[in-house]
């Protein structure tokens, strides 16, 4: 048994870790492991900078292969020993049945057991397929040989995957560096924007200070002049009090007239409220729009029967007359809604919708599985992230009851979806102000969502930066 183990160990040492056959034209690499020359060359075929060992993953600096002729001779010797040992084993190794002490000359295919002639007697192996040992061995040797090529292919496939994965760290470094440079660029844009904004705001503040200072000076002068008038009246009053009756009454009219002069108003100092108009998503709005704008079209097969979608699929309006349209399962039949293309599975996307003078509308994104039969307006908790305009104010269903800011009535709304960050942001494109941002986790495809109010004014998807 010791000889068998030693021979098996030797055979393992002289086999190639890649093809699992005996080493052919063996070579040694930097870390000391041995391979067939052809196998290691194939493993490194697509690599350029570093060459990992398929066994220990040591990163070899160069594609250096050192021939190992001594190992090649050892392989020949091991092969000869194996052949010799196999012949001797076939000659000597005739095992006996432990139960009957008879030679094991048969093999049961059902139980995969060696048998002697007595073992085949009923009932243990009755009805089983039993073959002579040499016939069974030949059959199974042939069957085992059919496993060789699939296993070799699996080894080759795994080796190829290892080679591909070995390139991932470099790919990761490149992606990180690209994103780092992109972030630095955005921060630089932000810094420049803030510097310009700061200079502009401080300049306006200085101009306003000068204007108010001038008005204050004028107001102080007016009060000083009024004070002089009052002092003059006091003097007149003192003089008139000692005049004879006729003289007093001759001057009384002018005195009363002068005493009716109105006091100047007090000037109140009030500064305009200055603020920083931070850029969209902390970067330049124009850059974000240009980089992430997507082309959105409407899906007529989802449109409520009272909606008319334009031929170019960019515009939708409400009509009181119900359209004769096919009853598709994905068509909205209760709320006057239409969905858009494309589906969003990942990434960042920006689009604009012209709302004009519509008195009621809702736009945003929704899950592709949103129910088409529900009567209530869907909210974020039901997979629909929208803002809604009703007469003169916004709200965001599912985001609380507090009205959203609406200082400037919008003519157009910008929607920015960041799928990975789980954010949907809305912007008033008329004054570039931020309206609201939903934060959630997205794990299903999303689609643009349009609710069209009960008036004939259209909703239109913008194809250009109409509000820049």
Image (tube, rainbow, N blue to C red):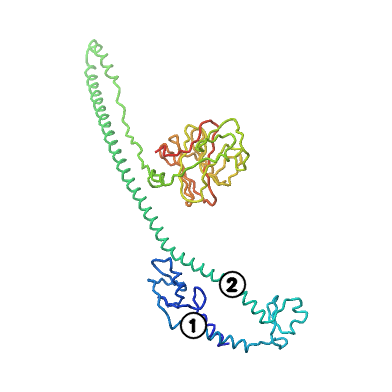
Quadrant holding the C terminus: top left
Q: Nearer the viewer, residue 262 or 402?
A: 402
The answer to whether residue 399 of the structure is visible from this angle is no
Q: Nearer the viewer, residue 276 or 217?
A: 276
Q: What number is the disc on residue 31? A: none
Task: Provide the residue designation for mark 1.
Answer: 75
Quadrant holding the N terminus: bottom right
Q: Are marks 2 and 1 in contact (CB under 8 Å)?
A: no
**Which secondary structure lies at badge 1?**
helix
Residue 326 position within the rendered picture, expressed as x and y whole percent measured from the top left = 62, 38
Query: Dot 1: few (<14), some (14–19), or many (≥20) neighbours within 10 Å?
Result: many
Q: What number is the disc on residue 147? A: 2
**Residue 39 to residue 180: above or below:** below
Residue 150 position within the rendered picture, expressed as x and y whole percent measured from the top left = 57, 69
**Residue depicted at 46% across the width and 72% down the height:** 54
Query: Dot 2: few (<14), some (14–19), or many (≥20) neighbours within 10 Å?
Result: few
């Amino acid at each position: 048994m010791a000889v068998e183990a030693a021979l098996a160990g030797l055979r393992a040492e002289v086999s190639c870790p890649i093809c699992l056959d005996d080493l052919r034209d063996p070579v040694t690499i930097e870390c000391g492991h041995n391979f067939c020359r052809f196998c290691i060359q194939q493993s490194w075929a697509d690599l350029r900078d570093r060459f990992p060992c398929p066994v220990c993953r040591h990163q070899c600096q160069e594609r250096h292969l050192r021939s190992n002729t001594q190992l090649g001779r050892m392989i020949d010797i091991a092969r000869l020993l194996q052949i010799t040992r196999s012949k001797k084993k076939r000659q000597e190794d005739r095992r006996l049945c432990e139960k009957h002490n008879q030679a094991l000359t048969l093999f049961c295919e059902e139980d995969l057991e060696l048998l002697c002639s007595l073992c085949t007697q009923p009932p243990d192996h009755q009805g089983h397929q039993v073959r002579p040992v040499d016939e069974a061995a030949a059959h199974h040797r042939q069957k085992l040989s059919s496993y060789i090529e699939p296993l070799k292919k699996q080894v080759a496939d795994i080796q190829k995957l290892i080679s591909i994965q070995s390139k991932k760290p470099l790919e990761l470094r490149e992606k990180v560096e690209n994103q780092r440079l992109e972030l630095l660029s955005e921060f630089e844009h932000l810094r420049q924007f803030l510097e310009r904004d700061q200079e502009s705001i401080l300049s306006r503040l200085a101009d306003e200070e000068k204007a108010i200072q001038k008005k204050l000076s004028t107001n102080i002068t007016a009060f000083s002049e009024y004070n002089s008038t009052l002092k003059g009246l006091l003097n007149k009053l003192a003089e008139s009090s000692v005049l004879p009756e006729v003289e007093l009454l001759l001057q009384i009219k002018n005195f009363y007239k002068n005493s009716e002069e109105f006091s100047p108003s007090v000037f109140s100092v009030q500064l305009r409220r200055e603020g920083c108009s931070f850029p969209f998503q902390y970067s330049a709005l124009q850059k974000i729009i240009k980089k992430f704008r997507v082309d959105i079209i409407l899906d007529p097969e989802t449109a409520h029967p009272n909606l008319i979608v334009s031929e170019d699929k960019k515009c939708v309006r409400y009509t009181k007359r119900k359209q004769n349209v096919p009853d598709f399962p994905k068509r909205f039949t209760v709320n006057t809604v239409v969905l858009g293309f494309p589906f969003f599975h990942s990434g960042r996307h920006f689009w604009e919708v012209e709302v004009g003078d519509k008195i009621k509308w809702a736009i945003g994104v929704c899950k592709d599985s949103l129910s088409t039969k529900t009567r209530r307006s869907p909210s974020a908790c039901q997979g629909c992230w929208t803002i809604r305009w009703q007469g003169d104010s916004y709200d965001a269903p599912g985001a609380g009851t507090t009205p959203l800011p609406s200082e400037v009535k919008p003519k157009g709304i910008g929607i920015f979806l960041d799928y990975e960050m789980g954010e949907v942001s809305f912007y008033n494109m008329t004054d570039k102000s931020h309206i609201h941002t939903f934060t959630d986790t997205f794990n299903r495809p999303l689609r643009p969502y349009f609710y069209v109010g009960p008036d004939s004014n259209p909703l239109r998807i913008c194809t250009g930066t109409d509000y820049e």
